[in-house]
Amino acid sequence: MSTATVQKRGFGATLWDYLTTVDHKKIAILYLVAGGFFFLLGGLEALIIRIQLIKPDNEFISAGLYNQMFTMHGTTMIFLAAMPLIFTLMNIALPLQIGARDVAFPFLNSLGFWLFAFGGVLLNLSWFFGGAPDAGWTAYAPLSVQSPGHGMDFYVMGLQISGAGTLIGGINFLVTIVNMRAPGMTYMRMPMFTWASFVTSILILFAFPALTVGLILMMFDRMFGANFFDPTMGGNVIIWEHLFWIFGHPEVYILILPVFGLFSDVISTFSKKRLFGYSAMVFATVLIGFLGFMVWAHHMFTTGLGAVANSIFAVATMAIAVPTGIKIFNWLFTMWGGNIRMTVPMLWAVGFIPSFTIGGFGGVMLAVAAADYQYHDTYFVVGHFHYVIVGGVVFGIFAGITYWWPLLFGKVLNEKLGKIAFWPFFIGFHMTFFIQHILGLMGMPRRYWKFQPNESLDIGNLVSTIGAFLMAIGTIVFIINIIYTALKEEKCGTDPWDGRTLEWTVPSPPPFYNFKQIPLVRGLDALWVEKVQGNGEMTPAEPLGDIHMPNNTFIPFMISLGLFIAGIGFIYQVDNKQWLIVGIAGLLITFISMFVRSMKDDLGYHVHKEDLEKGAGSK
Amino acid sequence: MEKYAGSTSYEFQKEKNKQDMKFQLVTFACMIVFTLISFGLVIAEFNPMFTIPIILLLACVQVGFQLYYFMHMSHKGHSLPSVFLYSGIFVAFITILAMVTIVWW
Ligand code: HEM
Ligand SMILES: [Cu+2]
């Protein structure tokens, strides 16, 4: 496997390489492609929603299709776009930031991706087989249990499969951070992005099981005649809401925390300063993660939990604003007096701070339980969560992808086009969502197919739709930028941003084994420490030696394919028991693949010292 | 190495293993007794309001024994697993607490 002489390979060989890869950098690209695709799909659904609401009494799409549209928009954006794009960032940067050659379990990394991908495809197949899910991304029972057709079955099976992938990914990152840090990389020297990913992975570990349990109950109710959510049979619909939000609230922090970490790194790099209050930032991250588990019922204030429960959850919710505030101020203080370079990632970061803060204000308003009786299920909530998710998570993903593009593809995205993409997106974002707060206060309910001409909601909705198109323009420019950069830009070499952390000590793109020699870490901002002391590069922690690498494998693909087929079988056995054969066949594929994996020893291979000296793997 | 360290560290290790063995046997005996007590309470048909809390309490103690003496969590180098274990217990606990107090009650 000496890759010293890499030739141009055929398309088939490249495809096979990606189907079987266990390299975290290639898996990052897979997540990027799949997540990017679903992001565009979810965006298209959003535009259709906004076109329907562009004017009063519009007939652009029917009410039923509208329900499918907003359900799939929310589900796709959260589970199939934001999550995998966050995993892109973690995969590309995290092992490099802690000085590791790969994640702890490369096989599981690949399995996590393929489970996610097949789950996402399964969910979206529903469009072609009699209609998509239509009970909202929150799938509240009893609506979700009674929803006719197979839409909600696709929701249950699709999310179950892709959720398993996410759980696997989270555990993998946990073990990686705990066990694979380079010598000298103590916990309190880890870059903020790594810290945030660590806490995020803990949240994944504890939050996703609640979703899994909820989906299993829903699966039994819908497909196998159980009555967990049927009050007439002794069930209870509220259980679904609790399970969903015990997962759902941590989930929103799963999305935002990595982005907090990323912005900390970006702001510190481009202010040419150490992050202000590093240990306070770590503390705030952990505290947010901890509190995140005690606030889920703020989504359920109006279900009638009672005054005591509402008060407890309201106070706990407001408490989260404190660590969040700590972070906002630390970012500002990091920039204060810094030597600021307004690169594209920094531009997104600077745009993020006020945008996210407005979202937080909305959140604290919603947290006032008594007031929430007014806001709940109106466009005010829609405004709030888009401010935090788009202004936080999506801005962060744009920033992160731009920042780490050199590690992914060895080039810096064109700065000029990057800025041209930012402005329409930024302006469009505020146009779309700020006015939605006001629409909500005026009484427009969320998930509203149509409003009438004499309700004074016309202007607000029109502005909102125009904003959505501006965001679409920004996204298109971003894609043009990717194409332009691929065709026209030069390779950027090592450390294009004058970075501070370990991922910038390796060439861009990094060789497949990442580090020829594992570096010795001598402080926070490990690379910067060396730069300040005049070394400019890391001291190795080990002599040059053979490097042990894992082999590629097709088994994760097969395991996931099996579950995908099984999912289809179980969905359709409701109509005709013969479909059970398909379900069982799918499970067999999965189990046989797992069996093969267990029985066949795969010890990997070694990259030899001599080849390394000749420059194997570096391009 | 064997000659030098042999005497002290080997002796120490041996003593320690002996200690561990003793603890394991004691806890094992305790667990059997606990189980007998639980069954006894049920067979003797005590008031359930009395039996159920006692059984739950004994179960918790048994889990502790299991983790600390059989799965060696009392040994060094288990701080991280403990953190995760207790976080998990915490999350499960508030989930159950919430379900019991605001859903089923
Ligand atoms: C200061 C921090 C925050 C507070 C106090 C807060 C508070 C709230 C409250 C009380 C609701 C429920 C409103 C209702 O349905 O009546 C809510 C909804 C929501 N929040 Fe936040 N939030 C905060 C931050 C965030 C962040 C950081 C995110 C995501 C990155 C987020 C995402 C959401 C989502 C997705 C919903 C709506 C879910 C749905 O019903 O579909 N929030 N928030
Ligand atoms: Cu929440």
Image (cartoon, coloured by chain):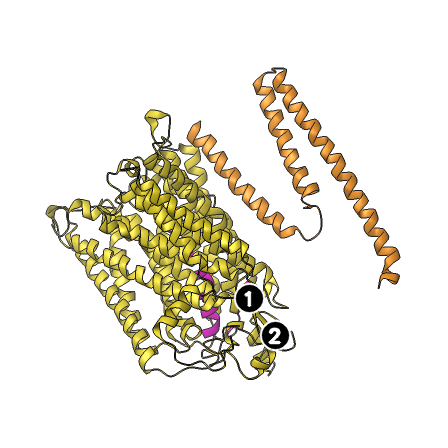
Chain colours: A yellow, B orange
Left or right side of A281 for A43 = left
The amino acid marked with disc number 1 is Gly
Are discs 2 and 1 less than 8 Å apart at CB?
Answer: no
The amino acid marked with disc number 2 is Asp
> Measuring 26% from the left and 64% from the top, which residue is drawn there?
A471
Work out whether A142 lies above or below A67: above
Nearer to me, A166 or A504: A166
Left or right side of A249 for A547 = right
Work out whether A371 lies above or below A255: above
Q: Main secondary structure of the magenta part?
A: helix
Find numbered disc 1 in the image and state the secondary structure of the residue it sits on. loop
> Measuring 79% from the left and 46% from the top, which residue is drawn there?
B17
Find numbered disc 2 in the image and state the secondary structure of the residue it sits on. loop
Percent x, y for residue A94? 50, 65
Q: Which residues are magenta?
A: A256-278
Percent x, y for residue A305? 39, 33
Residue behind mark 1: A604
Percent x, y for residue A62? 15, 47
Asked whether residue A288 is in view, the answer is: no
